[in-house]
Image (cartoon, rainbow, N blue to C red):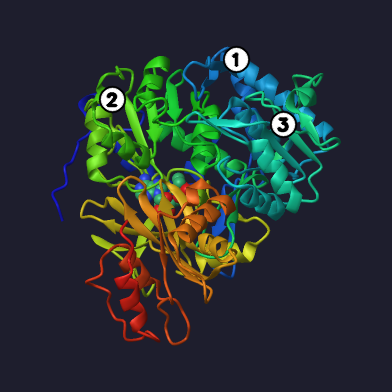
Amino acid sequence: MSEVTVHPVSAEWADKALIGAEAYAEKYRRSLAEPDAFWAEEAKRLDWIKPFTRVKDTSFNVDDFRIRWFEDGTLNLAANCLDRHLADHGERVAILWEADDPATPGRRITYRELYAQTCRLANALKAQGVKRGDRVTIYLPMVPEAAVAMLACARIGAVHSIVFAGFSPEALGGRIDDCASDVVITADEGRRGGKTIPLKANVDAALEHHAPNVKSVIVLRHTGADVPMVAGRDIDWADAVAGQPGDCPPEEMNAEDPLFILYTSGSTGKPKGVLHTTGGYGVWVSMTHEYTFDYRPGQIYWCAADIGWVTGHSYVVYGPLANGATTLMFEGVPNFPDHSRFWQVVDKYGVEIFYAAPTALRALMREGDDWVTRTDRSTLRLLGSVGEPINPEAWEWYYNVVGGGRCPIVDTWWQTETGGHMITPLPGATALKPGSASTPMFGVQPALVDGEGQLIEGAAEGALVITDSWPGQMRTVYGDDERFFQTYFSTFPGYYFTGDGCRRDEDGYYWITGRIDDVINVSGHRMGTAEIESALVLHDLVAEAAVVGMPHDIKGQGIYAYVTTIAGTEDSDDLRRELIQWVRKEIGPIATPDVVQFAPALPKTRSGKIMRRILRKIAENDTGNLGDTSTLADPGVVDDLLANRPES
Ligand code: WTA
């Protein structure tokens, strides 16, 4: 193993941070030893309508499985993000918005304005017949109205399901169907990197074949493009909110009432609707946003994630707004109009805390330091990383070039399922090791297990599990409690299984090594290999497909697809290109295969199971080391795959 550089906590950070090393150790100890007292205290960060009397009631065991936090308390999370800030700092900027095109004026929305806009839309949703518990699908670009839509749902107790605006009509339709939304909120078009995305047209296409129960589509005029409106179904956002009062009483929600559904990919089957509830999630994202980023009111904070992913939910909207922060929303991409864009935005708004995915950093690093060093960035004080492992080289570049060697980096490991940060350095407490997410958040008990499901102690490598519940944990797969239990709690009974492999070093630091299930992480986006395979086999000429991850310098992982066409098909380059387009259309551009290899047959065991281990090795070009192939039904298949591996 190569030498690890350790960056100790600077004297300045140790001195001024909310949580120093001793405070971390003591709070962490207490969070495990006295969870009820610890969480009752932390829960005070939210305003409760009716205080809870029970804190934690959880078990991961099959016989008495349950996950309940603060279960008899009531609150409203939108009111926690808005109303309670009005008295003291209603004029503070809640959302700073920077458009895709730097020439388009930005927007500054105060807490008071955000409150009024949210209430108007909440009233409009009620007027459309949306009731507490109903599902609302949101398919919007990165505009402040996306936060308004989320908060409006939360205000009236409706459950939002955001679908990333890069997903195809097919993917959108499937998600609308799965949770039976009867309202969709979208925009005429989105803009990203100078391109337009036909959002309303995508909704129309999705609704042609799906979701017969969608009663209304609320359409935000964003680019002003002329889009067809279906009479009786579609309504302009402006018309919907016109005349609606700027106040709307918040619905009193139970702590365990659903807040949102967010679809994410798993090893098998269709994407799962991850369900988060109100109280525990609210406490978790508020607490982690404050401690991980050492957030103090008034600081300008920018999380560059899209609201279509969990990072956008927890760290663009709910966490920061619950804490009264000023959160920056950026519509664009890091390399438009040029590779300085991120740092120009930092300078324009005086950003102090910046949080992004390694894939963006690697892409920018490749373009050279000039794009960074010609900007000022002197306001930056803390940097964050999320979504995938960050390689030490990118870490050092982020630290030295972007942060000028002044800013600690918090490498936050977590998942859609965990609601918020689980393993992360705290800037005033944790010496940093580039590439390690380091140590657990309060209340989080990570552990490593071996192939037999036995806990392993000390410095070791294994599958990462979490041994007890934490407030921000997902509560179920929407509509499928059984799938929830099977997916996360049956592999290693009694533990939550993360799907990640992990190494723990002699200092107790955790190093995430990546997914060990059939999920791949492409540019920080989770893709299920099964989903891409299903899309491929929908094509008339495809008989069978197997998809695996391959190493990719920028994206972390790329998508490698093995395709067996039906007999008599000519496996041409044209067909290869067609299949790549096909997957883009079926799922969306993020699922674009990097390599398609035609395979006359796939390596299978005698019982017909595809041997993915071998396919992974070939995709990784690790062909000297294919391991045991003796159980293959036809070992000749492998020789053919090796002989015809396309150059990538
Ligand atoms: C990976 C994103 C290493 C991991 C918040 C996890 C990471 C999956 C890190 C969840 C990190 C996320 N270091 N790997 N700091 N953060 N991952 O649900 O494999 O989109 O299981 O949540 O991303 O992806 P998801």
Kindly tell me whether residue 39 is visible in this rendering.
Answer: yes
Q: Which of 542 and 439 is in front in this view?
A: 542
Give the distance between the C-alpha atoms of the residues marked 3 and 2, in whole angstroms: 39 Å
Give the distance between the C-alpha atoms of the residues marked 1 and 3, in whole angstroms: 36 Å
Check disc 3 and give the amino acid type: Val
Q: Which of 407 and 394 is in front in this view?
A: 394
As drawn, the label of residue 90 is: 1
**Foreground label between 2 and 1:** 2
Q: Mark 3 points at which residue?
A: 227
In the displayed structure, does residue 636 sit left or right of residue 105? left
Q: Is residue 401 above or below residue 548?
A: above
**Foreground label between 3 and 2:** 3
In the displayed structure, does residue 558 sit left or right of residue 5? right
The secondary structure type at the circle numbered 2 is: helix
Report the quarter where the N terminus lies.
bottom left
Expressed as whole percent of the image width and height from the top left, the position of residue 87 reads: 62, 15
Expressed as whole percent of the image width and height from the top left, the position of residue 396 reads: 22, 37
The answer to whether marks 3 and 2 mark residues whose Cβ atoms lie closer than 8 Å is no
**Foreground label between 1 and 3:** 3
Residue at the far top in the pictured view:
91
- Please name the residue shown 42% across and 50% down the image: 522
The secondary structure type at the circle numbered 1 is: loop
| Cβ of mark 1 under 8 A from ligand 1 | no
Q: Quadrant of residue 290?
A: top left
Q: Mark 2 points at which residue?
A: 372
Check disc 2 and give the amino acid type: Val
